[in-house]
Structures are given as structure tokens and as C-alpha cells.
Amino acid sequence: MARGPDGSWTFLTNHAHVLVCIAQNPDMRGREIAQEVGISERAVQGIISDLVEAGYVIRKRTGRRNHYTINADGNLRHPLEDEHTVGELLAMLGRLS
């Protein structure tokens, strides 16, 4: 179960929270994402790896930093939502136009 910074449960998972951060700022550092989401940098690295492996995020190294691009056409993973895309989720949250 996803937990917020105050320990209460949240509707979205940490994977969704990381995706929202990347949508807001494709050049955001892992440390900044961790701070924003309220999880460790190591957890952020694992989540980003999951998102990249699943094809939801493309990671491109630019100098010493990463730049991320979201695949807005990727379908959500759970059978209850799999007819919807990541782009639809981010648009609903006001993070993608």
C-alpha cells in the first residue's frame, strides 16, 4: 500500500507519484523526486528502472544528468484500468496537456 509523507494511505502508488514528478519536470534528479514523493533515492531508482523496462519512460543520459520522456500511449497495467493510458492518467491529474 502506498503511504503519504504523514504515513496515511494514498490512492496512487509510488510508481504513479514518480511518473507525475517526471511529467512535471523531465530533468528532475532522483534526489528531488525522492524528496517530493517521500521515499528513498534507492526506491526512486528502482521505480524508474521499472518504468523504463516496461516502456512507460525513456531515459536519455545528457552529460551527468538524465532526461526522461514519458510514453503517454502506454496502457495502465491493472485489468481494471488497462483500457486507459498513462497519458490519460497524467492529463486527468493536470500533468499532461
Image (cartoon, helix red, strand yellow):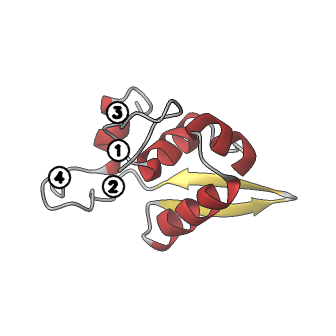
Closer to the chain start, of discs 3 and 4, is 4
Q: The disc labelled 1 sits on which kind of residue? A: Gly
Within the image, what quadrant is residue 41 found in? bottom right
Closer to the chain start, of discs 2 and 1, is 2
Q: Tell me the SS state at disc 3.
A: helix
Q: Which residue is mark 4?
A: 81
Judge the density around disc 1: few (<14), some (14-19), many (≥20) Cα neighbours within 10 Å. Answer: many
Which numbered mark, 1 or 4, is in the foreground of this view? 4
Residue at 40% in and 33% down: 8
Residue at 57% in and 44% down: 22
Judge whether 37 appears above or below 78 on screen: above
Q: Are marks 2 and 1 in contact (CB under 8 Å)?
A: yes
Q: Which residue is mark 1?
A: 87
Q: Residue furthest bottom?
A: 53
Residue at 27% in and 56% down: 76
Mark identifier at residue 91: 3
Mark identifier at residue 73: 2
Q: Are marks 1 and 4 in contact (CB under 8 Å)?
A: no
Q: Is residue 68 left or right of residue 91?
A: right
Q: The disc labelled 3 sits on which kind of residue? A: Ala
Q: The disc labelled 4 sits on which kind of residue? A: Glu
Q: Tell me the SS state at disc 1.
A: helix
